[in-house]
Amino acid sequence: MANADISDRGDRVVVYHGAELARYGFGDGHPFGTERLGTFWTEMIRRGLDDRVEVAPPAQATRAEIESFHSPGYVDLVAELSAAGGGLLDLGDTPVFPGIYEAASWVVGTTLDAVGRLADGTSRRAFVPIAGLHHARRSAAGGFCVFDDCGVAIELLRSRHGIRRVAYVDIDAHHGDGVLYGFEDDSDLIIADLHEDGRFLYPGTGWEHETGAGRAVGTKLNIALPPGAGDDEFFAAWRRAEAHIDASAPELVILQCGADGLAGDPLTHLEYTAAVHRRVTERLCRLADRHCGGRLLALGGGGYDPQGIRDAWCAVVEAMLETRPA
């Protein structure tokens, strides 16, 4: 429901929730389980945040929308294995379950619904918790990610909404390789990606020298942090990232706010607290207000410790609610 304090529809913070989003997850003890959305939403209710935001239902992407980023042959493969009900989409991280195509299409469609709201001025901020599947390449899955909703959103921001210059900020512990390599030579996609050093963590990419290709050299910023890095190390690096995005004067900002950098996550080696997610969201809200009418889209990304999911994602929502236009 909408916050009664908000009279201007365009100032609403939209958060997506629904059974269709929760379907995207893997069974048999897989780290990316279907309980992640419920874990977050229970904490949203406990903190009273559900009454302060507009709760929006999921939406499903069409095949044509998915193919704005992904190759038709890869989409065929996902659809065929989904119908068959088994198999692997990569070397083992991303197993197939019956209906995985449809589950992944709901993630993409929900991100696109949020993009549409931001593009047409219906909302200033939006958060999609089960989204930010940044490892999927144009022709391959990877790292629990079937379809790259980030990549699809960027493509359709250009072709559907006329928004060309997009800033993509990624604070997930894992490097966003699907986004970087999908747009490596795109000078209008400005990337700042802060992640654990790839020598110690999947996918083993995201080096400082990877600044873009061709005419896009200098538009991509990768900052690799060592295992054990905490808030102090992150904030020291964040100054560079924020300056890089600010200088680009984007028309819309996307934040992939994976919760797996928080201390206690079973898959990573970073030691953040939720203060990282709060401050990054606050700073990007200010930056978005300055450059692009406040348009900030946050995507939940990774996170495999229930407490980390609760703390990080609720910090993002709280910061969106508390950082209003001047």
Image (tube, rainbow, N blue to C red):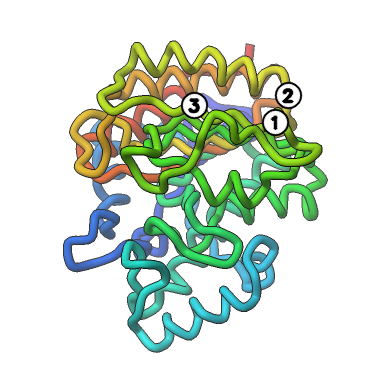
Asked if the residues shown at circle 1 and circle 2 are in contact, with their CB atoms under 8 angstroms apart, the answer is yes
Using the image as rendered, state which of residue 174 and residue 308 is in the foreground: 174
Which part of the image, by quadrant, shows the C terminus? top right
What's under tag 2, amino acid-wise? Ser
Specify the label residue 219 is tagged with: 1
Specify the label residue 16 is tagged with: none
| Mark 2 nearby-residue class (10 Å; few <14, some 14–19, many ≥20) | some
| Mark 3 nearby-residue class (10 Å; few <14, some 14–19, many ≥20) | many
In the figure, 314 relative to 18: above or below? Answer: above
Q: Position of residue 156 (x, y in %)?
A: 72, 54
The residue positioned 26% from the left and 58% from the top of the image is 33
Horizontal arrangement in the rendering, residue 302 relative to residue 187 (left or right): left
What's under tag 1, amino acid-wise? Thr
- Residue 259 position by quadrant: top left
Give the farthest residue toward the bottom.
84
For marks 2 and 3, the one nearer the N-term is: 3
Q: Position of residue 314 (x, y in %)?
A: 34, 32
Depth check, mark 2 against mark 3: the one in front is 3
Q: CA distance from mark 2 to mark 3?
A: 17 Å
Using the image as rendered, state which of residue 10 and residue 283 is in the foreground: 283
The residue positioned 50% from the left and 19% from the top of the image is 282
Viewer can see residue 324:
no
Specify the label residue 223 is tagged with: 3
Q: CA distance from mark 1 to mark 2?
A: 8 Å
Q: What residue sits right under mark 2 in the picture?
A: 248
Q: Position of residue 273 (x, y in %)?
A: 28, 22
